[in-house]
Image (cartoon, rainbow, N blue to C red):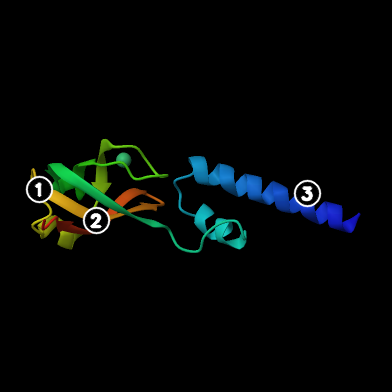
Amino acid sequence: MKTITAISLGTLLLTTSLLAEESCTCGTHVAAATVSAETKDAPKRHPLKGIVIDVLTDKSALLVKHEEIPGVMKAMTMLLKVDADTLKSPAATKDAAITGLLVRKADGWWLEEAKVDSK
Ligand SMILES: [Cu+2]
């Protein structure tokens, strides 16, 4: 009896945290999710290649047309948040071919370590 109850509770918690991850943008669900063995500790970083379509300084973001990231997303044009240093770097230039790491954070998709593709 005790075991069954524990499993049911675990499933319920897991389901709840997965649902929260789908819809919640408050950031608090991240702490809850890490309790589960099913989820990773740190956000995954996915190598990205793309072209800067536009630089949105006021939003601290780049509009990037990126290639497919297998298992994460298809090729598309999307807004990626970047830090202040990246915004001042050569990567934040219209039509620049860039590489970087795509990261999903509580407040959306970020591009880290953005660099002009040197090849
Ligand atoms: Cu995308």
Q: Which mark is residue 8?
A: 3
Name the N-terminal-most of marks 3 and 1: 3
Q: Are marks 1 and 2 in contact (CB under 8 Å)?
A: no
Neighbourhood count class around disc 2 (C-alpha, 10 Å): few under 14, some 14–19, many 20 upward: many
Residue drawn at x 8%, y 43% is 95
Image position, residue 25 (x, y; %): 44, 46
The residue most toward the front is 119
As drawn, is 28 to the left or to the right of 74?
A: right
Q: Of the residues under marks 3 and 2, which one precedes in the sequence?
A: 3
Q: What residue would you read off at disc 2?
A: 100
Helix, strand or loop at label 1? It is loop
- How far apart are the two marked residues, 3 and 2, measured between alpha carbons? 41 Å
Quarter of the image where the C terminus is located: bottom left
Q: Quadrant of the N terminus?
A: bottom right
Mark 3 neighbour class, 10 Å CA radius: few under 14, some 14 to 19, many 20 or more: few
Q: Position of residue 90 (x, y in %)?
A: 8, 57
Mark 2: amino acid: Gly
Q: Amino acid at mark 1?
A: Ala
Amino acid at circle 3:
Ser
- Tell me if label 3 and label 2 are in contact, CB under 8 Å: no
| 11 sits to left or right of 111 | right
